[in-house]
Amino acid sequence: MMTAVDDDVALYRRHAAELTRYATALVGPTDAPDVVTDGVLAAFRSPAWPTVSNPRAYLYRAVFTAAMSAKRSDVRRLRREAAVATGDVVAAHESSADAQRALQQLSPQQRAVVYLTYWDDLTPAQIAELLDVGEGTVRKQLARAREQLRRILDGH
């Protein structure tokens, strides 16, 4: 007899690889596994979890939330480190034509939309459902991301 925990474990195993690829696009390969773990555990602990009608979409949103939390933590840590740095002036790095660096300059939601569009080959409607936003929001974020990538990669 399968329990709710068994069901959750099976669901995690079914979606772990795709969630990790998604998290990699959001936070990079080093932090992606931790972000997935944090997001999935938060989802499973949520009081709403037993009533979720689309578990896959809920897990994508939970991973996105965990990624944003990780990014905020990184920013706070970098600020603390900069505040205690000993007189070394670090020059701002120029943006690189490297695609990964260009993607990192997008907002988290733009990176998510770009990833789901080009790597997972999802339609705007599918992305809107996964991220729990309107389809118009997805299209707008994708257009803004494309424009920003164009500027970055063209060196403007």
Image: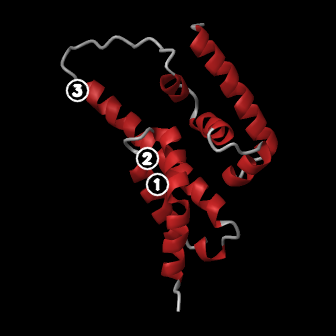
How far apart, in angstroms, are the residues tagged by discs 3 and 2? 28 Å
Residue occupying the far bottom of the picture: 1
How far apart, in angstroms, are the residues tagged by discs 1 and 3? 31 Å
User: Which-is-in-front pick, marks 1 and 3?
Assistant: 1
Relative placement, left or right, of 65 versus 84 is right
Q: Which residue: 54% across, 28% down?
A: 103
State if disc 1 and disc 2 touch (CB < 8 Å): yes
**Reading the chain from its start, which is encountered first: label 3 or label 2?**
2
Q: Which residue: 37% across, 41% down?
A: 30
Relative placement, left or right, of 152 versus 69 is right
Measured as percent of width and height from the top left, residue 85 is found at 22, 23
Graded by Cα atoms within 10 Å as few (under 14), some (14 to 19) or many (20 or more), the crowding at tag 3 reads few
**Reading the chain from its start, which is encountered first: label 1 or label 3?**
1
Q: Amino acid at mark 2?
A: Ala
Check disc 3 and report the residue beneath it.
84
Question: What's the mark number on residue 36?
Answer: 1
How far apart, in angstroms, are the residues tagged by discs 2 and 1? 6 Å
State if disc 3 and disc 1 touch (CB < 8 Å): no
Measured as percent of width and height from the top left, residue 142 is found at 71, 32
Q: Secondary structure at mark 3?
A: helix
Q: Secondary structure at mark 2?
A: helix
Relative placement, left or right, of 119 versus 73 is right
Q: Quadrant of the C terminus?
A: top right
Q: Which residue: 56% across, 73% down?
A: 47
Q: Which residue: 65% across, 42% down?
A: 116
Question: What's the mark number on residue 32?
Answer: 2
Graded by Cα atoms within 10 Å as few (under 14), some (14 to 19) or many (20 or more), the crowding at tag 1 reads many
Measured as percent of width and height from the top left, residue 121 is found at 69, 42
Q: Secondary structure at mark 1?
A: helix
